Each structure stands twice: as C-alpha cells, then as structure tokens.
Amino acid sequence: MAQLAEEILAALDSEQRAVATAVRGPVCVIAGAGTGKTRAITHRLAYAVDIGVVDPQRILALTFTARAAGEMRTRLRALGVPNVAARTFHAAALKQLMYFWPQVLGGRFPALLTTKTGFLGEALNRANISAVKNNAVLRDVAGEIEWAKVIGLAPDEYIKAVDDYSRPVRVSNNKVDATQIARVYEAYESLKKQERAIDFEDVLLLTVGMLEEEREVRDRVRDQYRYFTVDEYQDVSPLQQRLLDLWLGKRDEICVVGDPAQTIYSFAGATPSFLLNFTNKYPGAEVIRLSSGYRSTPEIINTANAILRNANLGHELDPMNEHGERPTAQGFRSESEEASSIVELIKADIASGLASNEIAILTRTNAQLDLIESALNQAGVENQVRSAERFFNRPEVREILTAIRSASVLSEGDWVSDLRDALKPFGESEYVRAFLQLARELDSEGLTSLRAFLREVEDRAEQNNPPVLPGVALATLHAAKGLEWPKVYMAGLSASVLPWGNQPVEEERRLFYVGITRAQKSLSISYYGEPSPFLAEAGL
C-alpha cells in the first residue's frame, strides 16, 4: 500500500475504514448523526483515487446542499484530490442542461428563477385566488407545487394525488384547498412558459427528459461520470432517483449514505424507500453501519437515543466523547417570556467567553424565529438567520469580491495579509469578518495564494455556499439539518407546535431528533404552555 493511501486510512476508526476501503460498488452506508459520514465518504473517494480504482474526473459526488458540496470539495482538496465534481443534484443537472442546451434545443437558455415568489403572486391573481399573499403563504404554495413536480404530477393530477397520498394541503393560516392549488399551479406553469423561465424543479425534469430522449447526450454523460456517491440518500425524491438511474445506466459503481432517522423532507417529496430498499435493487450490495457518535456528549447522545428507542426509529449511537452537562427543559408562560429568557442566557454565554457563532437557536417555524430575532436585536446581540437573502447577491459582498479580484492580480507574498489590506476600506462589517475567517481556515488547510482564495470564493458563489457570518445562528429545525454548534437552544417546543398541525407524527419526531443531534456540548430546550410530548419520550 502506498504511503498516501496509508495516511488516508490512518485517520479513520474501524467503521469508517470499512467504508473507505469498500471502493467497489454498490455500497450502502447507514450513518447515524455525528458518526463521521462525510469523513468516511471523502476518504473513500481519496483512497479509491490513490490506489487507481477511479480517475477523479470520473467521479460525481452528490449532496443536498451547496454547503455540504463545498465542504466535500474542501476535504477532498486537503486529501490531495482537487478535481472531483461534488455538487448538489440541481447544480449537476443544471451544468449538464446548460452545456447540451445549444445542441439539443438551440436558442437562448431560459431564465432560471432563484425564487418563485414574484411568479406565484401573479399566478394567484390569474387563478383568482384571494388568499393573503405574504411570504409565508407564498412559501407554502411554492412547497405544494414543488412536491407535485418532484412526484411527477401535472396540475390536473394534483387534486387526486393529495387524496391518494393522504397528504393535507400545507398552506398555513389560509383556506386554500387542493382545487385552488391546482389552479395556481397551472397558472404558474403558464406564466413561466410565457416569460421563458424555468425553476429548479424544471432543471431536474428537463435534464431527465434530455437524457431519456437523446442517446448521444446520455452516452456522453455516462462516459464522463462513472463513479457515484450520494449523501443524505434518505432525502432523495422520485425525480432525483430517476435522474440518478439515468446517470448510472447499467453500472453499479454507487455508494449511498443515509440515516432513516433523519428523514424530514417527506412533505417535499423525499422518501427513505430508496435507502431502505437499496439491497433489493442491488442484492450484492455491501452494507456498512456507522454508529460511533463523535459530535455530541454522551448526555446529548443518550437523549437522542431515547427518541430512537421509544419510537423504533433506528440504531442507537455509541457515545465517544467525554461527559458533559445533561440537556435541560424549561417551560414558560408565553412566547415573549421564553424569548427574553433565552436572550439573557445567551448574553451570559457570550460574557463567559463563548463566541456568538458557537451558539444556535432552533425553532419549528420561521414565525417563531421572528420574535427571537427581534429580542436579540433589541438586546444588541449579533445574530444571523440561516436561509435568508442569498449572501453573494448582496451589494456589499459584490463590492468586496471586486476588491479581492483586483488585489489577487498583484498579490505575491503573504496572501492573507494582502487580503486583509484589500478589505480595510470596508471596515469591520460582518461580511469582512466572514471572508477573513474563511481565509484563516483555508490558509490552515494549505491554500497558498490570493488567486486560489478567489477561485474558492467564486466557486462558492456559483454553488451558493457562503462563508459563515458571525453571530448567533437562527434556524428552523429543517434548515439546521447537516449543521452543528457547541451550544444549541431549541425554543418554542410546545404541544401545539411540535408535532405541527396535521403533519405526520413520525416525521415530526424525526425532526425533533435532528434538532437534538445538532448540539455538541450543551442543549437547552424550552417551551411555552404545554410541552411537546416528545420531551417526555426523550426523558426530559
């Protein structure tokens, strides 16, 4: 074995090493929260490249978030494998669609909608729907249309499917029924066609159609990518699986990684059935389990295990870290009282030396975040809302990128110092601090020039994978998936909120589990009124 291959494997435990050395597919990895799955699969790719199993340019590593894709590319680069295509399903499909568009369809590529809000507002008007058109309603209507499209439903099929799937219409605080959603859906599709625009679901649909109908294109794509890894496989939708099958063809060089206990996107069309039935599709598949929990303290892991055990959600985790404080649960008389208490606790955390970006507040809904954000702002506590405005679209960020491009032309020596000098005119804004923090991280990983830093940032901009802003993180439980913090506050976990409305109790319980497993060292849970029944299940 080559020295580099030995180094790649040396950093892994026995379970992770089993993943890394299973370089021939099909492979299915069942990985619990915080078990080092990203480390395992990136080391598998690096090991496969090093021993000559695959050319790195023939690999397609698929993730569900741009952040995860960026993290994978960074890790692979540190392992000496800089040329792997690590992308989201949408990013990979979009790249192929844009490349082959002139050949297949010709003409100008359609405008890609980064948000549906404007088009949906007009679609509601065209459908004569009088519902209040606030952001929450538009977001919920968008979710219904996205679900229909990834399931493969046309507007006239939506109404029947809602009944067939026993799936309630998910539009909060508005009496919008399935018939009305179908009308909006039809108007939305008509408007896109009129304006020559496509959305992200169309990207997948058009790529699937192109690969199914164009043999030459299909053969070229299959020749390009021959070795596949799919992260968060429990969240694959039928449409994404259809695309994956087209990419694979008759090959079985595929490694999937997932955790049934973290299936939280069923409302958006995701299903764990592809993960659970993987060995039916590939009878000879190697199945490997990761169960050693490295993220959290034993106390937090034991709380998460209680949820798994009581609801039979999956295999329990084995805690590997030192002991810490036991998770707490506290009730309040009102939301405002709860928010005020959390703010005071966070102020004390920061005063004791904990950095603000090491703290997160997680809630079930976006509306709950608004109250907490307001309380933090009034107290002067720096914070950031996850999944807010796209970072790289902000005017201040675009100006900073212009300055970095100019500085990269002349930079020859200490590139971090050159970057710091280039950013001086912008003061000490949160954006400047975010770029400098990213620079320090990349410098420690061996990045050697400002030009290379610029390429990394431009790649992140293309993938919408921004640097982390300073401040306390605010996120819904769904948005927190895949992230972690030393200290986590789960707020507003009342009986009326979790489980939410008429959503399936099983998925809401899994959402609670995901929230618990975001915490590394400290977990504080709070509620107002009656507590969520899940707290008792967790022993809190």
Image: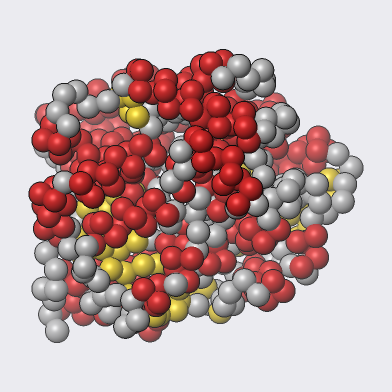
Q: Residue at x 80, y 65 (%)?
A: 536
Q: Quadrant of the C terminus?
A: bottom right
Quarter residue 264 falls in: bottom right
Q: Does the image show residue 291?
A: yes
Say if 482 sits above or below 301 in the image. above
Q: Residue at x 54, y 26 (%)?
A: 184
Say if 513 sits above or below 24 in the image. above
Q: Please state the horizontal and vertical placement of residue 38, each as a whole percent of the image.
A: 37, 64
Q: Please state the horizontal and vertical placement of residue 284, each as a whole percent of the image.
A: 31, 83
Q: Residue at x 67, y 30 (%)?
A: 176
Q: Please state the horizontal and vertical placement of residue 439, each as a whole percent of the image.
A: 31, 42
Question: Which residue is more in the foreground, 122 or 81?
Answer: 122
Question: Which residue is more in the foreground, 521 or 500?
Answer: 500
Question: Which residue is more in the foreground, 359 or 215?
Answer: 215
Say if 44 sits above or below 75 in the image. below
Side of 319 relative to 247 (left or right): right
Q: Residue at x 80, y 47 (%)?
A: 496
Side of 270 relative to 239 (left or right): right
Question: Which residue is more in the foreground, 431 or 482?
Answer: 482
Side of 322 relative to 286 (left or right): right
Numbered label tally: 0
Q: Please state the horizontal and vertical placement of residue 334, each as a whole percent of the image.
A: 86, 39
Q: Quadrant of the N terminus?
A: bottom left
Quarter residue 60 falls in: bottom left
Quarter residue 517 falls in: bottom right
Q: Does the image show residue 10?
A: no
Give the colour scheme shown: secondary structure
